[in-house]
Image: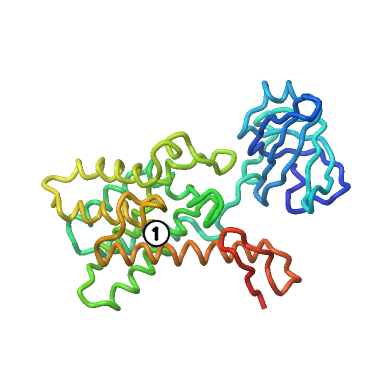
Amino acid sequence: MKQAFVDNLKAGASVDDIFVLAEKNMAQKRDGANYLNITLADKTGQVKGVVWDNVDYIVHNVGSGDFVRVKGSISEYRGALQFVVKDMMVCSPDEVVPADFLPATKRDVEKMFARLTEVTASIEDPFLKRLFELFWQDDTLAARFKKAPAAKKMHHAYLGGLLEHTLSMVLLADRIAGHYSGLDRDLLIAGAALHDIGKVDEFDYSSRIEYSDEGRLISHIVIAIQMLEEKLREIDAYPRERANLLKHMIVSHHGAREFGSPEPPKTIEAVLLHFLDEIDSKINGIREFMASDDPDEKWTAYHRLLERHFYKG
């Protein structure tokens, strides 16, 4: 049974336990000898490491994403913990408990999915109603959707995170739909439910959360459009304008071309969807950052991406 988790590693400790090899990169010492910079991970986080010994064996026999038994010690380097690895080898699947390595939502997945399908079932537009029947009755897709993360690091970066984020977005969309007159509630809810659906294939989440080849090559936005087109082909005489408006919700939800959207939002519903996505992703990311910080401190450490400290009170 795994006992040494990343969040309880201490400088000076000796470790012999199982981790996921999240990353490995070859480097050279001044004398030209090879060494490895690595990242080890489990469900509690990641720790950087260095391998001085058995480098050639590890390079040729151990791959990123493998479960590995690692022997070594914990030191401190430039103000952070560093795993100094003496030995590393790939584990037998029998040694691995998958739940030890991937963080997961604390919420009930089946209850979240039931609530999501309940809201989308309230859509009145017959075309969109039929579309969601096709999506949610696809058992293979539904199973992946319930398990997928919403991101690698920034927000909802855990199993079930995509469902949790999507449900939050749909509930926000449902609440705000009644606030502005003339708003197309059905379209806004549909966009919220499908805006990140492509992430079921954008990430690999078998042993760690990492981008899949498909995700790196074409992104979740393109994957989502492909998935939508596949379902549309099953609907006779679907209204092309409605389909295009829904596609626009997906392709524009990042808000601007420099952030990955092929087009900026050009409808009221698309503008709202973008800002709801910003709200939900940022709040979750900040809360996760606060939760991972020193509980005895009033202020968090500096958040590099958001360029500020956060007050915890």
Left or right: residue 308 compared with residue 274: right
Vertically, is 90 above or below 10? above
Q: Observer-nearest residue: 306 or 103?
A: 306
Name the residue beneath numbered marker 1. 114
x, y (%) of residue 164?
Answer: 47, 59
Question: Which residue is rendered at x = 35% and y = 74% of the image?
Answer: 175
Left or right: residue 137 compared with residue 211: left
Left or right: residue 236 compared with residue 85: left
x, y (%) of residue 16?
Answer: 81, 38
Q: Residues within 10 Å of mark 1 (few under 14, many from 20)?
A: few
Vertically, is 111 above or below 91? below
**Residue 182 picture quarter:** bottom left
Give the residue at the far left of this rendering: 237
x, y (%) of residue 235?
Answer: 17, 45
x, y (%) of residue 62?
Answer: 67, 26
Identify the secondary structure beneath mark 1: helix
**Residue 264 picture quarter:** bottom left
Vertically, is 304 above or below 260? below
Q: Observer-nearest residue: 246 or 5?
A: 246
Work out which quarter of the rendered image holds the N terminus and state it: top right
Give the residue at the far front of this rendering: 30
Work out which quarter of the rendered image holds the C terminus and state it: bottom right
Dot 1 amino acid type:
Ala
Question: Which residue is rendered at x = 37% and y = 49% of the image?
Answer: 197
Question: Which residue is rendered at x = 66% and y = 38% of the image?
Answer: 20
Q: Observer-nearest residue: 5 or 84?
A: 84
How many numbered markers are drawn? Answer: 1
Left or right: residue 234 compared with residue 191: left
